[in-house]
Amino acid sequence: MAQSSDLPDALPSSRTLARASLAALGVAALLIVGVVLPAEAGRDPLGSGAVLGLTEMGRIKVSLAKEAAADKAMDAAGGPVESRNGGTPADAQANRWRDSMTVTLQPNQGIELKLAMRKAEKAFYAWKTDGAEVYYNAHGEPPNPPKGFAAHSYAKGTATADKGDLVAVYDGMHGWFWRNRSAKAVRVTLKTGGEYLVLKEMK
Amino acid sequence: MHMKSSGSLPYDGRLSTPSLLRTRAAVALLAIGASALPAVAWAHGVTGGDKGYIMETFGIRIVPFIYLGAKHMVTGYDHLLFLFGVIFYLYRLKDIGVYVTLFALGHSITLVSGVVAGVSINAYLIDAIIGASVAYKALDNLGVLAKWFGRQPDPRTATMLFGLCHGLGLATRMLDFDLAKDGLLPNLLAFNLGVEIGQFFALCVILIAISYWRRSATFVRYAKAANMLLFLSGVALVVYQLNGYLSPSQA
């Protein structure tokens, strides 16, 4: 297409081209140090990342990558040790809260509370924070998930409270991961009832 | 919000992402050499990268979304290949401006309306169409289309149409990010603006590179070969994406 407009005189001169190349190199270097480095690695040598609000993104990515690496290491070590003996079996007293736990999340801290459940057991729950929104991810894992196993996700999002039922999709640990992305400490209170063995904090 | 019972398991598609990334990585190597890859998914409920960031934050975040839009464009080799094809025979800045504006207009329309309306097309299919757009542009540059159809299809219309397709791909990607309703539209517009900025930077680099090449005699000698290579890259993209679409792991 448009081959008719192949005018040799439309080519830039070497001078223009050299200038454009230098300018592009300069801009690229500036962008890499001032924008990409904060946004990807959380490092901010020029202070521009803080102004643009990109350093936070980099820090979050770095912390997520660290968590994922820790998860992998845990997988390699055979998964978290589970105690399956502390709980009382679910009985007829269905609609009663059995456990309640309150945890305090410092800024950027993440905590996981989980129920040991057998497949198809049904628990009910309610959690709320003392004000600020938190990120939550309700998910479940079998006892010794194979390498690269993707946890089953029940629900995720950001909220100040949530309640409902949780039906285990397989034997294993099912529960909530919360993370506080606000600047102040947040308390999360979880109440659980129904069919499960034990509620515990995952460490 | 109530958790769903085991009767209807919400599936977040995380299992399919790694294979998509592998495919993309292979194509990237084939096409233009390895480049930065988009968000990586991890096991155990930890989602890393851009997606993890978006999932764990909320509210209006203009600059981060501009950044993500620009990053998506600059690291999206399929969009870049198409742009390369579009400006291959464009010498005048005015022409380049017209075509790039048409392309940008097309993908802005489908990106914004696609996300707002929640229109999610299978990511493999839309990426296959984007691959087809690369192959189409190469054939156009080779002058084959004029031979087949007796006349040259209007390249402006084609660029606009493919802009609309590329926008659907961007929308699908945005929907995959599970954006919060809170601040959706401002974030979306920021992402779209970022796409334009990224496109502008990418275009500058492509233009400088192609200008050096145009000055050498090898440009005339290898222009045809370059477009054949572009065509093959487009076809490879289509094949890889259709393969991903048809493979059984894509439940």
Image: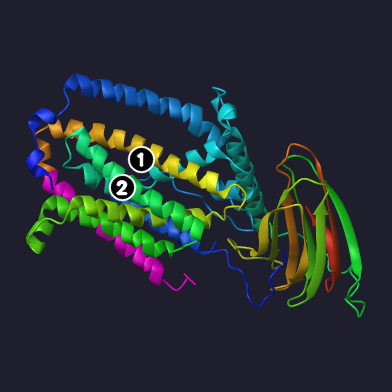
Residue, x 47% and y 62% (percent of image)? B119
| Residue A175 percent coordinates (x, y) | 75, 62
The reply to whether callout 1 and callout 2 are in contact (CB within 8 Å) is yes
User: Within 10 Å of the Cα at label 2, are there few (<14), some (14-19), or many (20+) other Cα atoms?
Assistant: many
Q: CA distance from mark 1 to mark 2?
A: 10 Å
Q: Position of residue B186 (x, y in %)?
A: 54, 44
Q: Nearer the viewer, residue A131 or B136?
A: A131
Instruction: Work out whether residue B233 can be spotted.
Output: no
The residue under label 2 is B103
Residue A96 forms part of the magenta stretch: no
**Residue occupying the point 39% across, 72% down:** B246
Residue at far bottom of view: A92
Vertical comparison of A117 with A181: above or below: below
Find residue A118 and report its image quarter.
bottom right
Q: Picture coordinates of residue A129 (x, y %)?
A: 81, 50
Q: Amino acid at mark 1?
A: Gln
Query: Mainly helix, strand or loop, the magenta region?
Result: helix
The answer to whether A152 appears left or right of B149 in the picture is: right
Type of amino acid under label 2? Phe
